[in-house]
Image: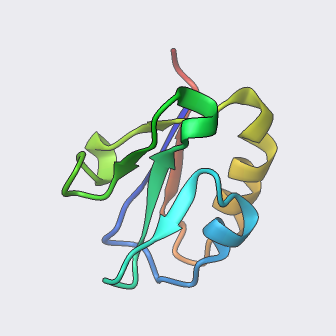
Amino acid sequence: MKVWIDQDLCTGDGLCEEIAPDVFFGMDDGLFYVKETASNYGTEKLFDGTSNPAGAEGLARFPDSSLESVIEAAEECPGECIFIDVGE
């Protein structure tokens, strides 16, 4: 499964990072982005628009064990900007 954030809708509240810090992270621009952690995939990969694409083109993989927290982050997000891709 994969997840991405639409930065145009992101309000910068940071609830996503509080709920699932292994999937979401904030940057100096006040917005939040997705990542793949080294503990899950061997190397850390940031989908920040610099190192890797952000937005709809920056889909980060996350392990099945994180599904509940990623769904909770999407449900709690005030900007409704978190999108989960359950396709393979």
Say which residue appears at 46% left-offset and 53% top-offset: 34
Residue at figure coordinates x 51%, y 14% from the top left:
88
Residue visible at 63% across and 67% down in the picture: 16
The residue lying furthest to the top in this view is 88
Asked whether, in this view, residue 19 is left or right of residue 35, the answer is right
Is the image coloured rainbow, by chain, by secondary structure, or in one colour? rainbow
Rendering coords of residue 77 (x, y %) = 62, 71
45 versus 73 height, above or below? above
Left or right: residue 56 versus residue 31 is left
Which residue is rendered at x = 55% and y = 43% of the image? Answer: 37
Residue 41, image x, y percentages: 54, 28
User: Seen in the image, is 15 located left or right of residue 47?
Assistant: right
Above or below residue 16? Residue 88 is above
The residue positioned farthest toward the left in the image shown: 50
- Residue 47: x %, y % from top left: 34, 50
Q: Which of 66 and 6 is in front in this view?
A: 66
Q: Where is residue 23 in the image (x, y as percent from the top left)?
A: 59, 51
Q: In which quarter of the image is the N terminus?
A: top right
- Inspect this view and state whether residue 47 appears: yes
